[in-house]
Amino acid sequence: MSTRPRTRPSSGSIIAGLIGIAALVALGVLLVLNGPQVVRSFFPPDPVSEQGRQINDLYTIVFVIAAVIFFLVEGLIVWSVIRYRRRPGDDELPPQTHGHNLAEIVWTVVPTIIVMFLFFISWQTLNTVEANTPQPDLRVRVVAGQFQWTFDYLPADGAADAKPVFSQSIASGEGGGLYLPAGETSHLYLTVPPGDVIHAFYVPQFLFKRDVVPGKLNEFDLKLDAAAAGQTFRGQCAELCGTGHRIMIFEVHALAPADFQAWYDGKVAEASATPPPPPSGGPQGPVINVTAQGVKFLESSIQAPADAPFTIHFDNKDVGTPHDVDILDASGQKVEDGKDFPGPGVRDYPVDGLPAGTYKFDCSIHPTLMFGTLTVQ
């Protein structure tokens, strides 16, 4: 009885084995030190809405099925590689097997059942997320335009084209953003001004993205969790919509119903307040023309007399996009705050005398794109 001579493993095999062991050790250390974070990275953000939880449940089911299939297939591959690897002295092919009825039935029927199951639960989730309440607690028209979000709060029974009760033209920052009541259903209409491009409404914690397409009304219900009250969620346009795409951000503020009602009533009172009458006798002092077009000021520098009143005549040519003109001193402190308004339109901003110096004028809604220098002398 003869035995096969034993051979020593090659240096390449030893190095490969050491690398594999080191990789497994490193992976084990990573999982021990950062286990929860590593596992969490495979899942979307925690949902903060009723619709988001439905999507998250669907994702979890699909992920679990995919993970089971992955480890089963990869495990069988690794087992087959080790079990049937070529050994020293194996100079002939092993017995070849062609066709296996049971195996072919299994790998046809099982995937078919899995796909049918995924289709059913996806269809069920889609119907749930797309369902709209006949009488939502709040209706808001979200207007996306290059490169700004505007939130029009509509009457309780208002349609998508209804006249707003008031509008939020500042999408983020102090006092700006979309305010919604937590624990209640809000209905959002997504629109764009004529001649604009496609945008997308996206908040990661909502777990879905909705396109804002020219000529098409997109609408959906959103019910934030009551536990989300007091939180702020950052959103952005998720479609490359032009050179100012990076500034198309917005914030969603979730308020408790009582706090939201107080905020809402304050905005209604503010919108209903009688504006102060314009100064008698026309514009005061010299008139300085400032024009906005293409989300930029056509004038990069303007001049005004020192210690004397003057008037900024602002012409907003951007259709459906709100702009304003603010004046800031050298420290960045706002010394004149112009009221924003959508284009096309004109407005005069009377300015009391300013001390001599160099100032900055900008649009508070698009400060990174629209700014210039005001020299007072």
Image (cartoon, rainbow, N blue to C red):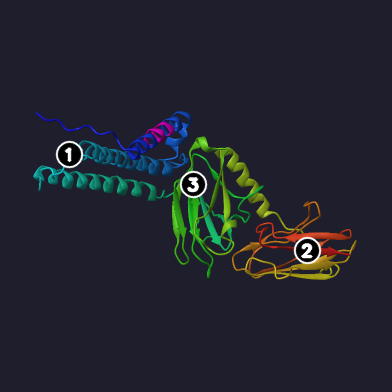
- In the rendered image, which quarter contains the N terminus? top left
| Residue annotated with mark 1 | 89
Q: Is residue 107 rendered to the left or right of residue 148?
A: left
Mark 3–mark 1 distance (CA, rounded to whole Å): 58 Å
Magenta stretch containing residue 115, yes or no? no
Q: Position of residue 356 (x, y in %)?
A: 89, 60
Quarter location, residue 303 = bottom right
Task: Between residue 128 and residue 260, name the one nearer to us.
Answer: 128
**From where the camera sits, is residue 352 visible?**
no
Magenta stretch?
20-26
Q: Position of residue 113 (x, y in %)?
A: 20, 45
| Residue annotated with mark 3 | 204
What is the three-letter code of the residue carrying label 2? Answer: Thr
Marks 3 and 1 in Cβ contact (< 8 Å): no
Height in image: 345 above or below 68? below
Q: Look at discs 2 and 1 and give the one toward the viewer.
A: 1
Mark 2 residue element: strand
Marks 3 and 2 in Cβ contact (< 8 Å): no
What is the three-letter code of the residue carrying label 3? Answer: Pro
Q: Is residue 367 rendered to the left or right of residue 9?
A: right
